[in-house]
Image (cartoon, rainbow, N blue to C red):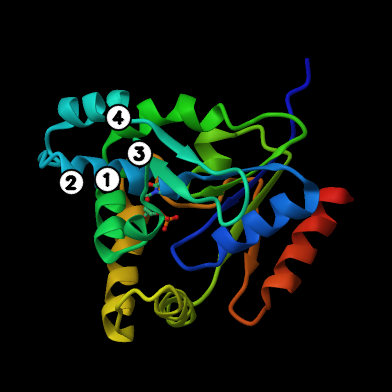
Amino acid sequence: MTKPPVIAIDGPSGSGKGTIASELASKLDFNYLDSGAIYRTLGIAVQKANVDFMNHAQIVEIYNKSDISFESVKPHNVILNGKDVSMLIRSQMGSDVASKLGQIPEIRDILLEGQRAYRREPGLVADGRDMGTTVFPDASLKIFLTASVKERAKRRYKQLITKGIDATLPDLLQDLEERDKRDTERTVSPLKPAEDAVTLDSTDLTIDEVVNQILKLFLK
Ligand code: DC
């Protein structure tokens, strides 16, 4: 039986992959998986439970007891145990705890099955760090989306300010550089393009331009 098609979009923080993946999912009427939101939400649950990030067994226990879901319509609000945590997970703390969790092999393993469950008819657009390399190695199309670190910091700044979340550009730049380092240097599923991925640099492209390029590649 053929599985539903997957468009995997990976890339560093602020490359625009979330916005682009969600837009593509709407255009194609596909399901959408924001894998970073799962890491962020679990991170918040761990933080709330006051559990040390070194205590992997207890983090697994928290994951098993947590109910994490996404609303199917945009902006895909994220619900943790019945509470909307969409704003909280986008905070600096949410970014930090997610990146830390991403470095723990056991956590990456237990999240695999849950992520793959989003692959349903008529198809899926999934964004993250390891969608094309580990979670959906048989994806129909793999995109590695990049942009300069300065441009990514500017985009994140705009995004946070629009949402009413406090931020400064130098802090965001430093945070992105630290997260890039953690995400690319970790031993398990590091952030890197899959061998068969198409790399797109979005520094000087609009969202529509990137979406259209990906659509062309998918539909050809
Ligand atoms: O995509 P994002 O910025 O929301 O992701 C937040 C953090 O979660 C990121 O710094 C690393 C981690 N993450 C991961 O390790 N693997 C994924 N597939 C998605 C996110």
Three-letter amino acid code of the residue under disc 1: Gly
Is 84 in front, or is 42?
A: 84
- Above or below, 161 against 46 in this view is below
What is the x, y in percent for residue 161? 40, 80
- How far is disc 4 from disc 3 in space, using C-alphas? 19 Å
What is the x, y in percent for residue 13? 44, 63
Closer to the chain start, of discs 2 and 3, is: 2
- The single residue placed furthest to the top in the displayed view is 1
What is the x, y in percent for residue 15? 52, 67
Closer to the chain start, of discs 4 and 3, is: 4
Three-letter amino acid code of the residue under disc 3: Val
Secondary structure beneath label 3: loop
Disc 1, disc 3: CB below 8 Å?
A: no
- Residue at screen point 31% across, 47% down: 186
- Above or below, 162 against 92 in this view is below
Residue where numbered disc 3 is placed: 188
- How far is disc 4 from disc 1 in space, using C-alphas? 10 Å
- Crowd around label 4: few <14 · some 14–19 · many ≥20 (10 Å): some
- Crowd around label 2: few <14 · some 14–19 · many ≥20 (10 Å): some
Q: Which mark is residue 43?
A: 1
- Above or below, 114 against 39 in this view is above
Disc 2, disc 4: CB below 8 Å?
A: no
Disc 4, disc 1: CB below 8 Å?
A: no
- How far is disc 1 from disc 2 in space, using C-alphas? 6 Å
Residue where numbered disc 2 is placed: 47
Q: Is mark 1 within 8 Å of ligand 1?
A: yes
Q: Which mark is residue 63?
A: 4
Closer to the chain start, of discs 4 and 1, is: 1
